[in-house]
Image (cartoon, helix red, strand yellow):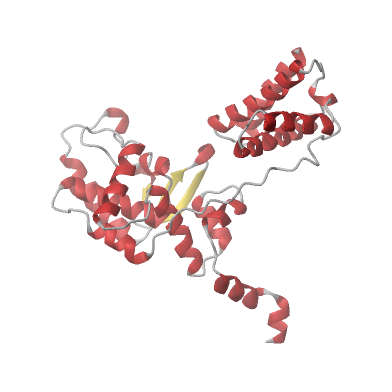
Amino acid sequence: MPKWKAYIKGFEAYLLLELSLSTNTTEAYLRDISKLEGYLNIKNLHYPPNEISADELTSFLAWLNELGLGIRSQARLVSALKAFYKYLILEGLTNHDPTALLDTPRINRYIPEVLNYEEIQLMLSTIDMSHPQGHRNRAILETLYACGLRVSELTSLRISDLYLDIGFIKVIGKGDKERIIPIGESAIKHINLYLHQVRPLLKRIKKEAEDVLFLNRRGGALSRVMVFNIVKDASKAAGIVKKVSPHTLRHSFATHLIEGGANLKAVQDMLGHASIITTEIYTHLDTDYLRSTIMQYHPFYQRKG
């Protein structure tokens, strides 16, 4: 199907250049569209994309479900199809959208563990500050919790991304999207201790890691596994029985902000979420907060007051 190749190539450029999606997401979307092309070949339906009906897409999804495709993969595939037809419409390659009535499969929301403030302080207190690596590990934990970073964002954090004198750091998140995050005094203090008193003690720093903030003993960037182990060891030393990972600190960051009255949109921006729906997954709001928000901002209650 020659037309399919041209459409998919144009779709790839659209995802990367216009939507600024990550390479991994782009490749996943392209594989999903290729699945549709493969399905049509199997069924001996030689349609170009602009001639496919909503019924055929529904049959395609039912076929994948029967093959055992996971619910998350199905949900992503629907997103890929919707993005594909949006691209075709924008380019004038079709005038109808067969995905308009497609329902995205519901995914049960997974709420990770959350630590309370006392548990986080207990974790921090277990770090042995008599060793140089202790200063680095304390700064890592402080930064993860203070800024709600993903592991990949922490390991790629650069010295040139620090604006500690004004209390901010710059982070490059998913899809190479840049965001500015405030950072607290305690995290600033421990980053400075590590940066100025411990990091210079390294015998050699690899050229490609000269601007990387957190380094291993060999002068290279930390791996994701190392960060997981640092967090895991601190939680174990603190006697915490919950399953704790770096993501637990990210989730705790968001939860504590929301419970303290922070605006959900502001938390979304700090976490780097494209959709506020994703932020709501990370912030299981309690009923007291929801009630107080309605009482404070809904015009009906304001009139009655």
Q: In front here: 214 or 179?
A: 214
Tally of numbered discs:
0
Pick out the residue farthest to the bottom.
Answer: 305
Please state the horizontal and vertical placement of residue 228, each as a whole percent of the image: 34, 43
Q: Which residue does the image show at 51% across and 65% down from the upper left?
A: 258
Q: Which residue does the image show at 38% across and 51% down from the upper left?
A: 243
Res 75 → quadrant: top right
The answer to whether residue 191 is seen in the rendering is no
Pick out the residue farthest to the left.
Answer: 130
**For residue 295, above or below residue 36:** below
Q: Tell me if 266 is positioned left or right of 242 in this view.
A: right
Q: In front here: 218 or 117?
A: 117
Q: Tell me if 241 is positioned left or right of 175 in this view.
A: left
Please state the horizontal and vertical placement of residue 90, each as a whole percent of the image: 78, 33
Please state the horizontal and vertical placement of residue 84, each as a whole percent of the image: 72, 31
The answer to whether residue 156 is seen in the rendering is yes
Res 190 → quadrant: bottom left
Q: In front here: 170 or 42?
A: 42
Q: Which residue does the image show at 31% across and 37% down from the upper left?
A: 222
Q: Which residue does the image show at 31% across and 48% down from the upper left?
A: 232
**The C terminus: image quadrant:** bottom right
Pick out the residue farthest to the top.
Answer: 2
**For residue 62, above or below residue 170:** above
